[in-house]
Amino acid sequence: MSLIKTERELGIMRAAGAIAAAVLEDVGAFVRPGLTTRELDEFAAARIRHYGATSAFLGYRKYPCNICISVNDEVVHGLSGARRIQFGDLISLDVGVRYQGYIGDTAKTVAVGGCGLQAQKLIDVTTQALYEGISRALSGNRVVDISRAVQTYVEANGFSVVREFVGHGVGRTVHEEPQVPNFVEPGKNSAKLKAGMTIAIEPMVNAGSPAVKVLSDGWTVVTQDGMPSAHMEHTVLITESEPEILTCLENLPSSLRAR
């Protein structure tokens, strides 16, 4: 499988990315206190169908939900269920869609109705860390340039970066090479970035320690110290000039906007 996408493939990936962005926008606007995470997942499933796509996560390695919904100290891969969303919760929404055989993958963390200053700082720092990483996603750079930018920004603001889960290449499958860590791994070879590569950059940032654990459900990743976490993600195209964010609403085809 080539990591360099053709123009035809990129056209489809722009549409897939826009659908993922639209679903994420719709789900984020739907979040409110009192909803169960299952109701939120069912709403996401309906929006994915609305745009003519399918969930890229449902059934992937036997994952049982349409999107990943992670609450407060849950970092990633949360499972939907009977839990009711409360005012002040931090909800991380990770949306992956498949459209015409290609993946769009994007995520954001939202505060339900509002949150405290420290929680808002966590969201803001994670968001900016994502864009710090994207700014280094340049042809001729290496993945470690992205990693360093994310880690430096996060740690300078008093938070920590999760080590066990990383960004990745994306295309026909959810996870392709190269891996895109949010931290520098000393002595490890780092892939060179080339025009035509498509990667998911996704800082996972903890308010406290970087240590995490997987719950007995086999999926939900939580912080070991119980402190909150935030997660932001875009699918990005490496070009000959500036990086292009594929998971943006502007790429949504007019035929899908009219739905």
Image (cartoon, grey):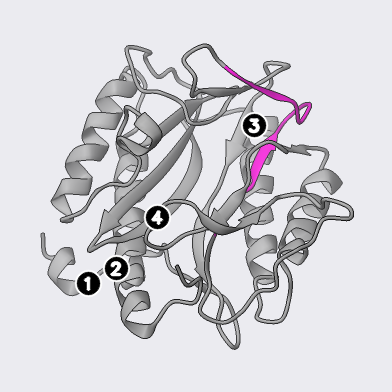
CA–CA distance between discs 3 and 2? 33 Å
The residue carrying pointer 3 sits among few (fewer than 14), some (14 to 19) or many (20 or more) residues within 10 Å by Cα, namely many
Please give the name of the residue rendered at 49% of the width and 45% of the height, measured from the top-left corner.
Answer: 108
Q: Position of residue 87 (x, y in %)?
A: 45, 20
Return the residue nearer the eye: 96 or 107.
96
* Marked residue nearer the N-terminal end (1 or 3): 3
* Marked residue nearer the N-terminal end (4 or 1): 4
As drawn, 110 above or below 87: below
Please give the name of the residue rendered at 36% of the width and 56% of the height, measured from the top-left corner.
Answer: 21
| Furthest-front residue in this view | 1
Find the magenta span and give its range.
200-214
Q: Position of residue 201 (x, y in %)?
A: 58, 56
> Which residue has dot 1 on it?
253
Which image quadrant is residue 161 in? Answer: top right
Question: Residues at badges 4 and 1 in contact (C-beta under 8 Å)?
Answer: no
Q: Amino acid at mark 3?
A: Ala
CA–CA distance between discs 4 and 3? 33 Å
Question: Residues at badges 4 and 3 in contact (C-beta under 8 Å)?
Answer: no
Q: Amino acid at mark 2?
A: Ala
As drawn, 183 above or below 28: below
> Which residue has dot 2 on it?
15
Mark 1 or 2: the one toward you: 2
Question: Residues at badges 3 and 2 in contact (C-beta under 8 Å)?
Answer: no
Mark 3 or 2: the one toward you: 2
